[in-house]
Amino acid sequence: MKKLFLAAILLVFSVIFAEETVFVQLKDETRKFLKSDFEDCGISHFYKIKRSSFYAVHTENRDNSLNCLEKSALVKKAVPDRKMNIEYKSNDPFFANQWHLLNTGQRGIEGNDAKVAAAWEYLESLGIAPGKGVKIGIIDDAFDLHHPDMKGKYLKGLDLVDGDDYPYADENEPHGTCVTGVIAAVKDNELGVAGACPECKIVPVRSGDMLGEGENMANAFNFVLDQGVQIISNSWGPTDNGGGEDMPEVIKEIVKYAREKERGGLGVVIFFAAGNGNEDISAEATFDGYAANEDVIAVGALNAYGQRSNYSDFGRDLDIMAPSSDIDGDYVWNPFAFDMIKDGIWTIDARSWYGYSQSDYTGTFGGTSSASPLAAAVAGLLISAYPELSRDELYEIITTTADKVSPVDADYDENGFSEKYGYGRINALAALQLLCERHECKGGLPEIEEETYEPEDLEMGSDIDEFPDDSMLPVKTTGKGCSVTVF
């Protein structure tokens, strides 16, 4: 039955991609949308968007249908779906050391990290596997589903590009693989790197450049919510320095529903990367309606010195910071200008020519693209410790316990908030300690026993199997609570 249901979803996707869409909201929300009520509007077909009051109405002539629908006495609102130019939030850092988990001074200043390694020890002292039973939804370009350092981590996903359940990376789609490694790369397997939430599982949705359309966004969010995720992390948003862009109303309704209704009313935690344009996400001219939405948590980036990364967006809607890369102050963003990037985050890479480094791992990932999944991973640790944790209490805990870094530059107000730093740098250990002072932390989420994509060897030719330079040679680092080998 599940396979038939998935096949039906994919069939819908394959049909809707060929037509244009209008989002329609009826004045009477108890009334059903009937094609017979709009016979002159040129409607091909329609369906109700889950977790929303809108219908997706398909037509071959959107302008004519929109004009017709707007004149109907039954319609409260008719809005054309349009494609937004999206940008995946990455500055792609450049060195092989996971200082963001435990900074012993290998980069920047000792202690400037997210206290993740200490959080692992704390959970393990309570007999809790860090992240056990937690699902995190990732909507991104694509994924190396068979990466050896993600064994058992990718649950069955969705490919919006090809219309199937195999969201595998194609050429020039390395971003999503790196994001998921930051969260969930296998720990203590004597291979590669460790994710910040090492027992978390990933529900992947491959979006490619199709995510810019509101209907595809809705389908992506609804898919991961249907899989029972507790957390969603989004390392994408409107193009930096591209002007103001609001979140479509249908997506606003879905994320609001997720916050208020999902998980039996506890709410799903949704993170968005703040962006890499060094601009104000709250100002009208540069408004980012995704990161600034009140139902999501906007994550900025700071470097290994505890200072805001030069590119990281800011504003009154910024919520929290997490460790990530930095760049030279006069640097113009380019994801492959490796020599300009500092304080990078080490993670898995899409292998062969599909990745950044043409290897199994990369030292060239970062930006708020890495900050958002790191914050999501910390949320995964908290929910694994106390599964009844609500979205709103989780938000209160991570903002209350955040480190007030760079106080002179930040200029925190009486509530501990800064437009440059939000409530400060996320602190996984302090957040867990406060949570477990309030509640009895004993875990309890069951092991996730669902089908996953299994590792596969990938043969690489001699012309593509070398690191770009000596900075990416293997480094082995052993730290408190974690031992990893970085290749």
Image (cartoon, rainbow, N blue to C red):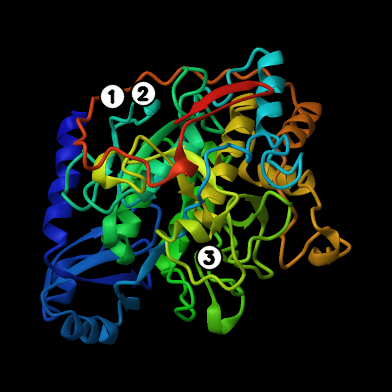
Would residue 270 be visible to someone looking at this image? no
What residue sits 49% from the left and 58% below the top? Answer: 339
- Under circle 3, the secondary element is loop
Question: Please, what is the three-letter code of the amino acid marked with disc 3?
Answer: Asn
Q: Earlier in the sequence, mark 1 or mark 3?
A: 3
Q: Position of residue 48 (x, y in %)?
A: 28, 57
Tell me the residue that label 1 is attached to: 455
Q: Are marks 1 and 2 in contact (CB under 8 Å)?
A: yes
Q: Which mark is residue 276?
A: 3
The answer to whether residue 271 is above or below residue 137 is: below
What residue sits 67% from the left and 39% below the top? Answer: 106
Is residue 42 or residue 202 the one in the foreground?
202
Q: Earlier in the sequence, mark 3 or mark 2?
A: 2
Q: Quadrant of the N terminus?
A: top left
| The image quarter in which residue 145 lies | top left
Q: Quadrant of the C terminus?
A: top left
Left or right of 451? Residue 261 is right
Q: Are marks 3 and 2 in contact (CB under 8 Å)?
A: no
Tell me the residue that label 2 is attached to: 151
